[in-house]
Amino acid sequence: MDIKVRGIQKNFGSFPALGGVDLDIESGELIALLGPSGSGKTTLLRVIAGLEFPDRGQILFGEEDMADQPIRERRVGFVFQHYALFKHMTVLDNVAFGLRVRSRGERPPEAIIRERARELIELVQLAGLEKRYPTQLSGGQRQRVALARALAIEPRVLLLDEPFGALDAKVRKDLRRWLRQLHDKTGVTTIFVTHDQEEALELADRVVVMNKGRIEQVGSTDEVYEKPATPFVFDFLGNTNVLPGEVRGREVYVDGQTSAIVTDSIHAAGPVDVYVRPSDLRVTDAHAAGFDAVIRSMQRTGPIVRCEATAVHSGQAIEIEVPHLHHDTQALRAGQQVRLRLNQFSVFPRQTRKGGGALPDVVANAPAEYRERGRS
């Protein structure tokens, strides 16, 4: 089932939860709605489900507008963060519940309901636990029961709201891999909400990055990470260094340096912010294109050496991440001045920062120059 969201607006009192959202979801796709608290991702999911009704806009399931239809008409499966299982029911009865409460004309015979429930219990790898109650299961097992129950009604769309948020890190990782495999088996169009960047990038076919009720960027996991469209997306998807720069044609001068980095795209001339991830900085020759920094401290975390440094010209604090066995780490020491090259970076028009360096929020319809991507 393909879904088209067109101009969806939703206000809660004077608060604009969704500000004119447009989104196309392909049939059989697994898509992540990613963003911080208050970004509108859960509201958008609930509007698609029919748990909330939009103030304006369309929700098209295929060619049918479902925006004003109740949840029972949409045939969606919904999985909540805290399972919402019936504690007095066994695993089998929980899974069968959605089929048993159908109207008499649509309800399958009891034998078929039980067979369908057993098939799904086996699909979610809980065979043998049919007679247990939710209190006798682990958190990961309960979430699998919740997914089986959502699938029992043969939903056109499966909606997951922070499905692994109540689980510990190890169980989350295991269930992420399992959910991807389950989706590949069933092929049900699936939308899940998360604020966990790693979860979204590992699981989804495409990621929808949201901020303040608007979509900042939609793309494959590689696209949103490697080619972030706005400063917000770049900063939200991992640690970020932001350095002052100046663009002149196809050249970028970083942190007041006199040697320029040549980019593969043209930007508007003038002051810019240069965004670079800690893992994209490397020590280079003193005369190479880049900028100078002083190492302040070094710390090894597993296979990675993390350095805190200060850009010489601007005094900007920066982070550097280098694999422990990389030659860059061999001679580094606190107090040393080094030249750093930028393996990969993005250039955005200079932003006014708030509160001592906090990154700005950027609206979804950023002009084209916001989306330019630079490489050394």
Image (cartoon, rainbow, N blue to C red):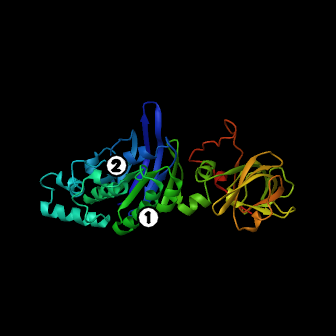
Lateral position of residue 14 relative to residue 141, left or right: right
Residue at (27%, 56%) from the top-left corner?
Answer: 149
Circle 2 SS class = helix
What amino acid type is highlighted by mark number 2? Answer: Ala
Where in the figure is residue 152, as x and y percent of width and height?
25, 59
**For this view, does 275 lie left or right of residue 45?**
right
User: Camera-side residue: 53 or 221?
Assistant: 221
Specify the farthest residue to the front.
136
Q: Nearer the viewer, mark 1 or mark 2?
A: 1
Residue closer to the observer: 47 or 358? 358
Q: Is residue 129 visible?
A: yes
Distance between the Cα atoms at labels 1 and 2? 25 Å
Lower sequence index among marks 1 and 2: 2
Left/right of residue 82 with respect to residue 70 in the rendered view: right
- x, y percent for residue 279: 68, 60
Q: Position of residue 63 (x, y in %)?
A: 34, 56
Q: Which residue is mark 1?
A: 177
Give, as a three-letter code, the residue at label 1: Arg
Considering the numbered disc 1 on the image, is that residue within a helix, a strand or a loop?
helix
Q: Residues within 10 Å of mark 2 (few under 14, many from 20)?
A: many
Residue 49 circle label? 2
